[in-house]
Image (cartoon, coloured by chain):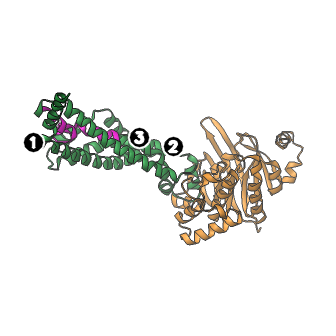
Chain colours: A green, B orange
Amino acid sequence: MAQWWAGVSETFARCFINEGRYKLLISGIGVTIKVSLLAIVLGMVIGFLIALCNLSKKKPLKIIGKVYTDVIRGTPSVTQLMIIYFVVFATINWAKWIIAAIAFGINSGAYVSEIIRAGILSIDRGQTEAGRSLGLTAKQTMMYIVIPQAVKNIFPAMGNEFITLIKETAIVGYVGLMDIQKAGDFIKSATYEAFMPLVGTAIIYFVLIKLLTIALTKYEAYLRKSEKR
Amino acid sequence: MGKESILEIKNIRKSFKDHEVLKNVSLNVDRGEVVSIIGPSGSGKSTILRCATLLERMDGGTLKYKGDIAASDESGTMVYADRNELKRIRRCFGLVFQSFNLFPHYTVLKNIVEPVVLSGQCDADEAKERAMGLLERLGLEEKAEAYPGKLSGGQKQRVSIARALAMKPEILFFDEPTSALDPELTGEVLKVIKSLAAEHMTMVIVTHEMKFAREVSDRVIFLENGEIHSQGTSEELFASDNERLNAFIGKLEQR
C-alpha cells in the first residue's frame, strides 16, 4: 500500500510539479478562458446580426443569413479554425489567441443565431401586434417588447452554447496555442505518462464548466424572478 | 352635417390563401358612435378589425381615418400610405385584444406608461400621471406595481383598456374583449366599455355578448360569410324578423 502510494505521488510530482509543469496548465487555463470569453462575445454579436438577417423580410439579407448558417454548420470547427488562421489571417500579425477567438466567434455565431431566432419566434405574435397597435415602431417593438422577453427563453440554450464553445476550444492546439488540452498533451509527451495528465486535463475542464453552470443557473433564477406569468 | 367621420372602410377584401374572408365590406363610423359587429365564428369580424388596425394587409378596398387615406386601391393596385403617414394614422386608433396581450415583463403601470413615452406623446411624468388617472378610474390603482401575471382575466382586460386609452385614441376597437374571460368576470369589463360609451367614446366592438351589444351600440352590424348581412340600430336589428339573424341571436341568447 505504502509502496503504491509512493508510486502515485512520484508520478504526480513528475507530471505536475517537476520543471514547474503546473504552470503550463495554469497558463493553459488562462488561454482557454481568454479565447472562450472573446469568442462568446463575438458569437453573440454575430449571432444577433445573423438572426436579424434570417428574420428579415429582405431577400438578400435572408440569403446571407442562410448561407452563413449553412456553411458554418456544415463544416468541422477544426477546419474553420485552420482556414481562418492559416488562410484568412495568414498575413496579419495579430495575437494567436485573438485570431483563434475570431474563428470560434464566427463558428458560434451560426449556432447563436439559430438560438436567438427561435427565441424571438417563441414570443407570441400578440405581443408584437400589441406593440404596433400602441404606436410603437417595428424597431421599438423588437427592442422593448420582444427581445427582453426572448432573452429569458433563450437563456438556457445560450448557456449550453457557452459550454459547448469552451469545450470546442480544446482544438486550438492545431494552430499552436497552448491551452489546457495542449498543456495536458505536452506533459503527456514529456513524461510518457498518459493517465494523470489527461485525467488532470479533464478535471480542469470539468471544474471550469461546473463553475460556469452554477453561475448561469443563479443568473437564470434571477432573470426568472421578474417573470410572474 | 355636424357629423365627423372617424373611420371609413370601403369595399375591403381580404383572403387567406384561397379562402375569401372579407368580400366588399364597407363601414363608416362617425365621432361618438358605438358600432357593434356580431356574427358567427369565421364570418370575418375580427379580420375587419385587423385590417382596420393595419395588422393585416387587405387585398383591396379603401381605409381612411378622419379623411386621411391609410390604404387605397383606387389606382388599381393596393397602395398603403408611406411609413410616416401610417405612423401618424396609427395614433388615431387603439385596439383591445381578446387575449389582452399585456407585456408580461412590465408592471401594470409600465404597460401603460411605456407605449405613451416610446411613441413620443409626452414625457414619463405626464404619462405616469395619465396612467394613474386611468387606473384609478378603472379601480386598479392598487395594482399599479403588480405584474400582469398576478391579475385576474378581468383585471388584465381592464388594464389593456387603460393602456389603449392612455394613447388618447380617436377610436377604440375591441376584438371580442370578453371571450377569453370566465363568465363571472365579463361584467366588470363590459361595465368599463359602457362607461366609455356614456362618454361618447367612438368605438367598434366585435362581440358575442348580444345583450351587451344591444344595450351599448348605436348601430349593430351582422356579418356572415365575409359580408354584411344586415345592419341597423340595435332596436331595428334585434326586432328584425329576418330568419337567419334571429336564428343567430336566439342561439346565443339562450346560452
Residue that numbered label 3 is attached to: A114
- Camera-near label (1 vs 2) is 1
Image coordinates of residue A122 in percent, x first then y, are 51, 43
Q: Callout 1 environment at 10 Å: few (<14), some (14 to 19), or many (20+)?
A: few
| Most foreground residue, A219 or B95 | A219
Callouts 1 and 3 on one subunit: yes
Horizontal side of residue B103 vs B162, given as left or right: left
Q: Quadrant of the N terminus of chain A?
A: top left
Mark earlier in primary sequence (2, 3) = 3
Q: Which secondary structure lies at badge 2?
A: loop
Q: Is residue A107 visible?
A: no
| Chain of the residue under the numbered disc 2 shown in the image | A
Residue that numbered label 1 is attached to: A19
Is B57 a magenta residue? no
Main SS of the magenta part reads helix
Residue interval drawn in magenta: A162-189
Residue that numbered label 2 is attached to: A122
| Chain of the residue under the numbered disc 1 shown in the image | A
Query: How far apart, in angstroms, are the residues tagged by discs 1 and 3?
Result: 46 Å
